[in-house]
């Protein structure tokens, strides 16, 4: 039986690329999605095309009752679950002065509560393996344009280190902090290219490069509590 991984928000973009890289590494995949069912089915076919199994599980992570059912459901589908990838997130521009309670709460629910309780339940139900959290290179700065989002990524960085200590030696917990990889859906491509030209490597990245860092961490069994910035040097600014 192959080892299995649960990837949240795995239907599209960076999550899809991580799911495909895991499949190439021989991992069976439980692919979580919320609204992108068609994309999830397409990604699942691509995963299966790499010779491993892929099962789909839909769940709105903002619904705490349903969120708490996700890890038990994944273990039911894949008893050999050894990896949790916390990738799903919401990302909305909102400086502190413009932030409404609903926007704040939805970021906390999807980007922080869900990874926290999925990690807790992974530890309880699986007992050994590893967790990989997707952060953001913004964690090194205190810009407030995406205040609620950025706070969730900073907190998830703290959780990565805390959990790496609490759950060692049985569970490794690491993170990847991407920079300018993909503009948000419907985002301004020209503005994205202009921002990319201003970072040290003067270009944006590709989801494949985030997946490469993820696979390094997945395969490095003497690494825990680590954050790799895949950001063209943006964290240096
Ligand atoms: N893109 C970048 O350049 C970049 C830069 C820095 C950090 N990151 C981090 O890297 C990760 C992936 O980035 P991305 O741009 O690929 O992410 P994304 O496309 O913005 O979101 C990934 C997935 O999260 C899921 N999601 C959103 N709300 C949800 C909810 N209420 N319940 C369940 N799932 C929900 C969506 O699934 P459905 O589509 O199925 O609804 C979505 O496809 C994120 O954690 C992000 O913070 C990305």
Image (cartoon, rainbow, N blue to C red):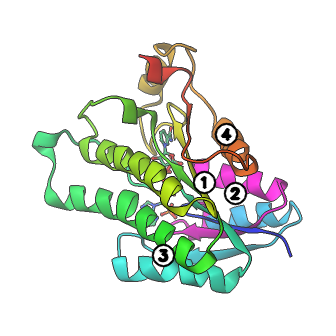
Q: Which residue is mark 2?
A: 19
- Disc assigned to residue 59: 3
Mark 1 touches mark 4? (CB < 8 Å):
no
Indicate which disc, 3 or 1, sits on the residue closer to the N terminus.
Answer: 1
Which quadrant would the N terminus be assigned to in this image? bottom right
Measure how far apart labels 3 and 2 are at the Cα level: 17 Å
Q: Are marks 1 and 2 in contact (CB under 8 Å)?
A: yes
Q: Which is closer to the viewer, label 4 or label 2?
A: 4
The answer as to whether callout 1 falls within 8 Å of ligand 1 is: yes
Q: Report which residue position mark 1 lands on.
A: 15
- Which residue has dot 4 on it? 213
Question: Residue 98: percent from the left, percent from the top?
Answer: 13, 44
- Asked if the stretch drawn in magenta spans residue 27, the answer is yes
Report if residue 87 is visible in the image: no
Read off the magenta span: 10-39
* Callout 1 crowding tier (Cα within 10 Å): few <14, some 14–19, many ≥20: many
Q: Are marks 3 and 2 in contact (CB under 8 Å)?
A: no
Residue 209 point in image, percent of width and height: 67, 35
Of callouts 1 and 4, the N-terminal one:
1
Q: Secondary structure at mark 1?
A: helix
So how many labels did they put on this image? 4
Q: Is residue 124 above or below residue 164?
A: below
């Amino acid at each position: 039986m192959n080892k299995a991984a649960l990837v949240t928000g795995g239907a599209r973009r960076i999550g899809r690329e991580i799911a495909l890289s895991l499949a190439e590494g021989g991992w069976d995949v439980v692919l979580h999605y919320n609204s992108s069912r068609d994309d999830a089915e397409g990604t699942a076919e691509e995963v299966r095309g790499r010779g491993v199994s892929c099962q789909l599980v839909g769940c709105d992570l903002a619904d705490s009752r349903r969120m708490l059912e996700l890890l038990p459901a994944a273990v039911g589908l894949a008893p050999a679950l050894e990896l949790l990838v916390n990738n799903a997130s919401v990302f909305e521009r909102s400086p502190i002065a413009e932030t409404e309670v609903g926007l704040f709460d939805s970021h906390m629910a999807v980007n922080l509560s869900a990874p926290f309780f999925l990690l807790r339940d992974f530890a309880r139900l699986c007992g050994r393996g590893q967790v990989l959290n997707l952060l953001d290179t913004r964690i090194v700065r205190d810009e407030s344009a995406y205040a609620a989002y950025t706070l969730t990524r900073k907190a998830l960085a703290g959780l990565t280190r805390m959990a790496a200590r609490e759950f060692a030696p049985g569970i490794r917990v690491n993170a990847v902090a991407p920079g300018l990889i993909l503009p948000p859906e419907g985002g301004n491509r020209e503005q994205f290219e202009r921002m990319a030209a201003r970072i040290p490597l003067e270009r944006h990245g590709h989801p494949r490069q985030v997946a490469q860092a993820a696979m390094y961490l997945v395969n490095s069994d003497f690494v825990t509590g680590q954050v790799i910035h895949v950001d063209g040097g943006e964290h240096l600014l």
